[in-house]
Image: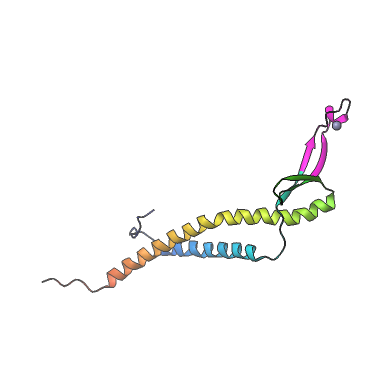
Amino acid sequence: MPRKGKTSPSYDPSTDRQTLGRLREEFRSIVNTFCDPRPLLRGSVERLARRCGKKACRCLTGQPHQSTVFVDRSGPRRKLRTVGWAESRRLRKLTQPYRALRRLRARLPGLLLQARACGDRLVAWRLGEGRRRAPAEERP
Ligand SMILES: [Zn+2]
């Protein structure tokens, strides 16, 4: 990466302009996700497979017992609750967007740093263009 305020002679400003355009679209998409009015829920729907521990149960040698649970993280304490198929679907629609939103939120600082680095290189290049257009220094 070129030093701040300087660009190499082979610097192509269109690359950074394209990157900035892509970052703008990504930023727009993140903002839209924040503005989405649909409700969110902190938690997850998970499949559990476990052995009950009872003697002579089929799970001892064969398939473990399977169940779908809702891991509720909406309160101060994590709670587990067994849910049926329909409810698991309904809960996923609330919990998945929240986790997706958290991932997008985590992307923001990196995105802004990247945008600033692109912008700095573009400005450095434009300053170089300006210097070349400035009148030459008068010599005595
Ligand atoms: Zn069992």
Q: Nearer the viewer, residue 1 or 49?
A: 49
Q: How many marks?
A: 0
Above or below, 110 against 119 in this view is above
Q: Residue at x 83, y 32 (%)?
A: 52
Q: Is residue 49 left or right of residue 9?
A: right
Point out the stretch of residues depicted in magenta. Answer: 47-68
Q: Nearer the viewer, residue 41 or 138?
A: 41
Whole-percent x, y for residue 92 in the image: 75, 53
Whole-percent x, y for residue 20 in the image: 49, 63
Q: Residue at x 60, y 56 (%)?
A: 104
Q: Is residue 59 visible?
A: yes
Q: Is residue 14 left or right of residue 125?
A: right
Within the magenta stretch, is there residue 54? Answer: yes
Within the magenta stretch, is there residue 22? Answer: no
Q: Quadrant of ligand 1?
A: top right
Q: Is residue 19 left or right of residue 87?
A: left
Above or below, 63 against 40 in this view is above
Above or below, 113 against 129 in this view is above
Whole-percent x, y for residue 21 in the image: 51, 65
Whole-percent x, y for residue 108 in the image: 54, 57
Q: Residue at x 49, y 59 (%)?
A: 112
